[in-house]
Amino acid sequence: MSKAFQATNAVVTGASSGIGRSIAVALAHAGVERLVVHYRVNRSGAMDTADAVRELGCEPVVLEADLSSPEGPQRLASDAFDALGIVHTWVNNAGADVLTGAASSMDFESKLRHLLDVDLTGTILLSRMVADRLLSQLEKRKTTDPPSMVFIGWDQAMEGMEGDAGQMFGPVKSAVMAFANSLAQSIAPSVRVNTIAPGWIRTAWGEETSDYWNERAKGQSLMKRWGCADDIARAVIYVADPENTFLTAQTIPLNGGFDRRF
Ligand SMILES: NC(=O)c1ccc[n+]([C@@H]2O[C@H](COP(=O)([O-])OP(=O)(O)OC[C@H]3O[C@@H](n4cnc5c(N)ncnc54)[C@H](OP(=O)(O)O)[C@@H]3O)[C@@H](O)[C@H]2O)c1
């Protein structure tokens, strides 16, 4: 396998489970040398991810930060660049889980405000600080290789989906994707910015969901299966590939092809 990411450093936010862990492992597999594994509360999950990337020859740096706290985004940006020096790939994957655990019993307004705090405000504030640092590292090092940032959206955010989930994740993830597009316009050609918009991916929520959602997730994909975290990780590797220097400002839905047949 080509090691396109050899001698590069990467950061994956929300890498203590699910999609973030798969992205971290895929980056390590692709040759990333040093990788920040970020988490909020799931330290043992972050350590498992760190062990998995270490086994692939990549040196992990485990960092904690709550993106909804006033100091979280600033601290993560500083700590990550202090630890790695130069960053080549930054993946904004962290997102609040309001579908499982204690948060699933919150009312609609509390879930919405939490998603806005973490997925939107936290991600935007963090990304602006990261973008500044990526630009200044290029100036200092006088290199022209564009580093890359990757965001995670949602395939149905713009089209809309019925119910509470559609009404909270739709506006939040649409805004994340809109921000990513504006950031891409702001920092090109120095930094590439792309978004992967997953469909139904079987992570914690999918493991314990109802028969209805299980059937719906499979039925709405032309490939007639749930997506898995590795499907998303492969797409992140593609857009972040340092050799993919013509790829920026794109949003790629990854859902097995949304089934629109009657
Ligand atoms: N699964 C799907 O079907 C699907 C579809 C579309 C988009 N997405 C998006 O894909 C991303 C990953 O989802 P997933 O399914 O892999 O979920 P997950 O397993 O719950 O992972 C979420 C990650 O985000 C971190 N996180 C949560 N709240 C945080 C906070 N306040 N500050 C910092 N980090 C925080 C978690 O860290 P701790 O656990 O350590 O707190 C965890 O590492 C999310 O942005 C999600 O919205 C998922």
Image (tube, rainbow, N blue to C red):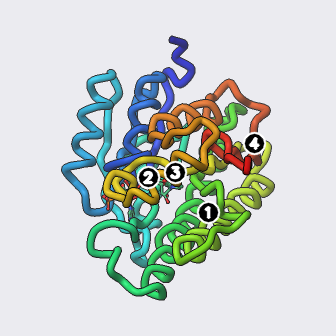
Query: How far across and how far down the image is residue 262, in percent?
Result: 73, 51
Q: Residue at x 33, y 56 (%)?
A: 39
Q: Secondary structure beneath disc 4? A: loop
Q: Earlier in the sequence, mark 2 or mark 4?
A: 2
Mark 4 touches mark 1? (CB < 8 Å): no
Amino acid type, mark 4: Thr
- Disc 3 to disc 4, C-alpha distance: 29 Å
Reading the image, the residue beneath label 4 is 248
Q: Quadrant of ligand 1?
A: bottom left
Tell which tag, 1 or 3, sits nearer the viewer: 3
Reading the image, the residue beneath label 1 is 128
Query: How far across and how far down the image is residue 112, in percent?
Result: 50, 80
Mark 2 touches mark 1? (CB < 8 Å): no
Query: How far across and how far down the image is residue 170, in percent?
Result: 62, 69
Amino acid type, mark 1: Arg
Q: Secondary structure beneath disc 2? A: helix
Amino acid type, mark 3: Ala
Q: Earlier in the sequence, mark 4 or mark 1?
A: 1
Please state if 240 lies on the left or on the right of 39 as rendered. Answer: right
Please state if 235 lies on the left or on the right of 183 as rendered. Answer: left
Q: Residue at x 27, y 47 (%)?
A: 46
- Disc 3 to disc 2, C-alpha distance: 5 Å
Query: How far across and how far down the image is residue 115, in percent?
Result: 49, 73
Reading the image, the residue beneath label 2 is 214
- Disc 2 to disc 1, C-alpha distance: 37 Å
Residue 114 in the image: above or below residue 126: below
Residue 228 in the image: above or below residue 153: above
Tell which tag, 3 or 4, sits nearer the viewer: 3
Reading the image, the residue beneath label 3 is 217
Q: Earlier in the sequence, mark 2 or mark 1?
A: 1
